[in-house]
Image (cartoon, helix red, strand yellow):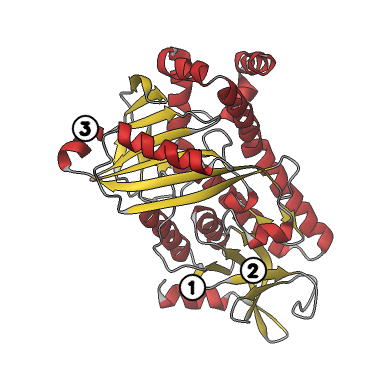
Amino acid sequence: MSSENAEQGAGREAESGGEKVWDVVVVGAGPAGASAAYAAAVAGRSVLLLEKAELPRYKTCGGGIIGPSRDALPPGFELPLRDRVHAVTFSLDGRLARTRRSRNMLFGLINRPEFDQRLVRSAEDAGAVVRTGVTVSRVEQHGPAVPDRRTVAVMLGDGDVVLARAVVGADGSASRIGAHVGVKMAQVDLGLEAEIPVPKTVAEDWAGRVLIDWGPLPGSYGWVFPKGDTLTVGVISARGQGAGTKRYLDDFIGRLGLAGFEPSVSSGHLTRCRADDSPLSRGRVLVCGDAAGLLEPWTREGISYALRSGRLAGEWAVRIAEAHDAVDARRQALNYAFAIKAGLGVEMGVGRRMLKLFERRPGLVHAAMASFRPAWHVFAEITRGQTTLAELVRGSGLARRTLGALDRS
């Protein structure tokens, strides 16, 4: 960030016994953390964003930006789109392929290193101070490192201590801040992905179209996302099926005729989905994004959940920073939890029900997506951001009755 912004951010810090105290410290500079830092900084608070890696850095992620993600971006944010998707091919373990098309863009595709770095720059432009290459070992809300009850001590790996009025944990699915809060996970899945550079003729065949393949393992599926001269190819299924998941990816790539191309990156990642009763805060510490286990259980889509929960966490962290006692801080933390559960929580509940149906009846799901026009319209409206699963359930009696019938079946 510019030295001017850094000086402005430092000038807004409070003092506690001669030590600087930030209003909000955010741990993790992915989409959730950058969104939280932006929301707190744009409110005029002193914000420190800590990231253990050097930016930009690669993340295992399909990179699909759906409507809810676009709506949650900072004003004026320019998406570094690599492709605009107007068609989706659905297949059932390589069979019964059917392509559905849309006149309007369904969603966009990005590379995470570019996207994440632009989000961090937005937070910097709003006044946040960013430190990379910093490992957070733990946070403490009581003890000798904590000067008073309004302060949280963020303990760094090099032994330094950073003080804050509120802390937002956005440090990924293996979050240390999440462990402090006591986040509990109900679903863990393994995603495997390859970034495959392809010749221009192959890239042209995929331009504007993605493939979603309902896989051979319960709850599994694969994807192909085109990004210029590179195809992002991946699969995901429940943890504990590692060998089967790897075999699915190899078979998937082979069926697509891509086995002869050398991947530039091959990676894996565990996604973790929270239990319904899992906490989202502890004292003056909030969690969001993957650190809170917030993602869609069926598709495991996490970027929109990260952006939306990060923004809410940043806004409520400001309120917690302003709280003068534990009772008020607790009230604001509960308001944050209510906001998350009223929106993202409802969507996750629908996603869990869809995952259960998909695990039992993948052929039915494929038939609906490939051939049943109302199902395709719902898919298109959600990806464009015209509605959400939560809005569908709240506003449509038919949707509620359909889900009930599917549950009973």
35 lies left or right of 262: right
Q: Which amino acid does label 1 sit on?
A: Gly
- Residue lying at 66% horizontally and 54% vertically, measured from the top left: 316
Compared to residue 236, the image places residue 27 above or below, namely below
Q: Is mark 1 on a helix, strand or loop?
A: loop
Compared to residue 94, the image places residue 284 above or below, namely below
**Mark 3 sits on what residue?**
205
Q: Residue 345: tell me if it is visible.
A: yes
Q: Which amino acid does label 3 sit on?
A: Asp
Mark 1 Cα-neighbour bin, 10 Å: few <14, some 14–19, many ≥20: few
Mark 2 Cα-neighbour bin, 10 Å: few <14, some 14–19, many ≥20: many
Return the residue nearer the eye: 22 or 196: 196
Q: Distance between the residues labelled 3 and 2?
A: 51 Å
- Residue lying at 46% horizontally and 48% vertically, measured from the top left: 73
Q: Residue furthest right?
A: 327
- Residue lying at 67% horizontally and 57% vertically, measured from the top left: 178
Tell me the quarter of the image containing the N terminus: bottom left
Dividing the picture into quadrants, the one containing residue 203 is top left
**Mark 2 sits on what residue?**
23
- Residue lying at 72% horizontally and 39% vertically, measured from the top left: 276
